[in-house]
Image (cartoon, rainbow, N blue to C red):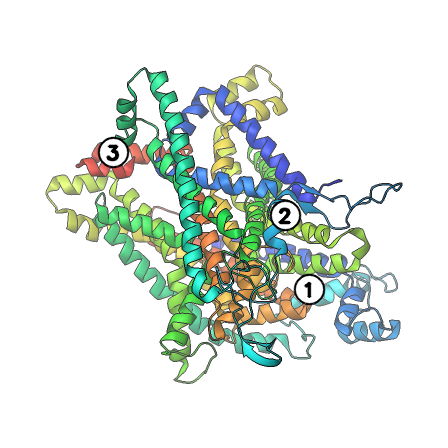
Amino acid sequence: MPVLLITDVFVWALVLMALFYAFKVSRQPHLRANWVLIFQRPAAMVSALILGFFIVVAAMDSVHYRPALEATPGQATRYASDPVSLLDQLVKPVAQARERSYSAPLAAHGFRKESIERDGGTVRDYPRLKFGGAHLSDPAAQRQADVVQRSAVAVGQALLCIALIAGLALALASQRSALPWSETAGRFWRGQSPWPWRALALTLACMTVVLFWLVQLSEVYHVLGTDRTGNSVLVFALKSVRTALVIGSLTTLVVLPLALALGITAGYLRGWVDEVIQYIYTLLASIPDVLLIAASVLLLQVFIDKNQGFFDTALERADARLFFLCLILGITSFTGLCRLVRGETLKLRELEYIQSAKAFGVSTPRILRSHIMPNLMHLVLINTVMQFSSFVLAEAVLSYVGVGVDPKTASFGVMINTARMELAATPVVWWTLTTAFVFMLVIVLSANLLSDAVRDAFDPRMRLRSSRSVKRATSTQNSKVAA
Amino acid sequence: MIRFLLRKIAYGLAILVGINLLTFVLFFQVNTPDDMARLQLGGKRVTPDAIEKWKAERGYDRPLFINDRATGVAALTDTVFMDSSLRMFAFDFGQADSGRDIGSEIRRRAGPSLALALPTFVVGIGISVVLALGLAFFRGTYLDFGGTVLSVIFMSISSLFFIVAGQFMFSRVLQLLPVSGFDPGTDAWRFLILPIAVSIFARLGGEVRFYRTLFLEEIGKDYVRTARAKGLTDTVVLFRHVFRNALIPILSASVAVIPLLFMGSLVTESFFAIPGLGSYLIEAIGAQDFAIVRAMVFIGSVLYILGLILTDISYSLADPRIRLQ
């Protein structure tokens, strides 16, 4: 039985919007030219690929349903009370293989000594894990060799897979360009193409190897260890990806209509309307972000506590909180976009083509829709991609402060927050923190690189600047950096 | 100038009135005093009498906006809204739920906050400007490229990582500095040096990259070409002309932040257990103390508006072409 959470609705709305945008881009040459420019940058292409992988993970985690319970004959099918997602289903073997407490990555034994009944007496020793390395009869001697052997198999399989795909792609490419395949391969390897095929292929190969390795070793080990309650860190991190992406993207999406509407109205109508709208956004900007977020989340918490019956399950409650967090984050940050849109509209409305549209008697809504709006879209796009990474980072901080997502929601902030205390203990539990930070770094870094490329391509000021520096470039290197 | 300032201050006051109304609606309308009382007194088993008593102690037992029972002006003034707002504007924040006076607590905690925030701010700007200038000097070389890549990577690392890693490195592994805590005396530097260094590091990437763009933008201007054509060396042009001109936007942008330094830093303070305003706020959020949060929102907004006015003034001081009107 499918379940639709609030954020699910918005995630899929976002996907639809992205598809619609892609469709429009493919129809409009000037937009297409910009996107070609973006994807011809190796860094941007690689980032897009990595982000794409995370988006797939997040999308799988956004299809929720309540699985059917084993049917007793003659009764209507009953459903489990807690919704699960496609991702949950996929990682079920690992997620259900819970240990009792901490265990290091790829370990076969627990991390701390426990009292174990053995040979009739009690000894303090590291307990065997229920899942990690359970197939080994003597982990101390066999584990290392087993890990190496499984890794080798995984890498081998991955390489085989890559070789197959690469061969196919090469055959296809050489057929299309009517060149001998050695020539095609040479061109590919020397990067003689406007498209960064080589970087793309290398990234894809690395991702395949890592993925194969993770899957292969996850069959018998907790690859990234387990946390305090014995849950797999890898699964938790994968679940956190959705939270991070939702916060990064929904936040802008939710307030986009508001910022656009207010900004355009203020800029186009001017006069007292402008004054009022300016007053509103100055007011919101005057309250330091963290304070406004803290105040709002505090209120939200009281509201949720007061209306417990409103939500069916804990997941829905946590999801509503995530959604409201996006809303609040959006409201604190929409002022920037609103101000930009207003300024741009003020400038646009004085341009000749708008004046002539007015003279022709085109109605105001029509002018706004077909003459002003399209010329503001680059601002929206740049703003959205630029703010994405800052929101992902902000979530971790807010969760630490206690005004972030619900403590039961999987998120990097929650992960860091719970793992932080363990640094004081000896020996150190390092893998939860490391996993959270590495995942965050990969997501945020790719987002930053992509947003740089988007800004360079869409911001007219940036384009002006880089073309000027190309002209002034004295060495070939200079132009490489500028381009 | 005076007229400009007066108008700015009047606008600031108007904004403050709006903020006051907004926070009041948030804290009293969305969340009635009854809810607050129940939350503070604990759970659902609170008797109505206890709630009434709690409200009466804080003067929350009156009507929120309009007092029907009073006549004349008192109908508007003898309300929770007017009372709490007027006292807020007089910087009298009343008592926290723990019974302490919020105003004196804030004054006491502003010191440690400032001791952390001010050096971070000054040294941070200094280091970022020097590094950015270096990158601009070596523009177009591998050094510049590497530096830019490095700052993007720095930007992408969560600030929490720097805190955790710093504490782990210097306090646990090397055992050079205390993990956290604070001492108001001369020994304070021992507690402050790590948080300061960590805060600077966490912001370095973004700032260096931003300042580098500012420098490069300045280098692209006509007067630089003229200076070069005149025969001045690249070094002289960069360090004398470009540096000074690019400093104007950097410093003016920083002025807006100065008043907010009093607010301290939320995360750093609470990680390092420094008894400043940031950790005060976190404690208040943890204890769900609305009076403190509202007071902090108000002070934060006052400081922000102050920063905006300072920015306007500093612009006109730094750049005579900008006239205040």
Cα distance in 3D space between marks 3 and 1: 58 Å
**Label 3 sits on residue:** A470
Tag 2, which chain? A
Q: Amino acid at mark 3?
A: Val
Q: Nearer the viewer, residue A96 or A148?
A: A148
Q: Amino acid at mark 2?
A: Asp
| Residue B315 drawn at (x, y percent) | 38, 52
* Rendered view: B17 above or below B178: above
Q: Quadrant of the N terminus of chain B?
A: bottom left
Quarter of the rendering containing residue A122: bottom right
**Label 2 sits on residue:** A88
The reply to whether residue A49 is visible in this rendering is yes
**Label 1 sits on residue:** B85
Give the SS element for disc 1.
helix
| Residue B28 drawn at (x, y percent) | 74, 61
Q: Residue at x 21, y 42 (%)?
A: B224
Q: Amino acid at mark 1?
A: Ser
Q: Nearer the viewer, residue A207 or A110?
A: A110
Mark 2 or mark 3, earlier in chain: 2
Q: Is residue A150 left or right of residue B226?
A: right
Tag 3, which chain? A
In the rendered image, residues at marks 2 and 3 fall on the same chain: yes
| Residue A30 drawn at (x, y percent) | 43, 22
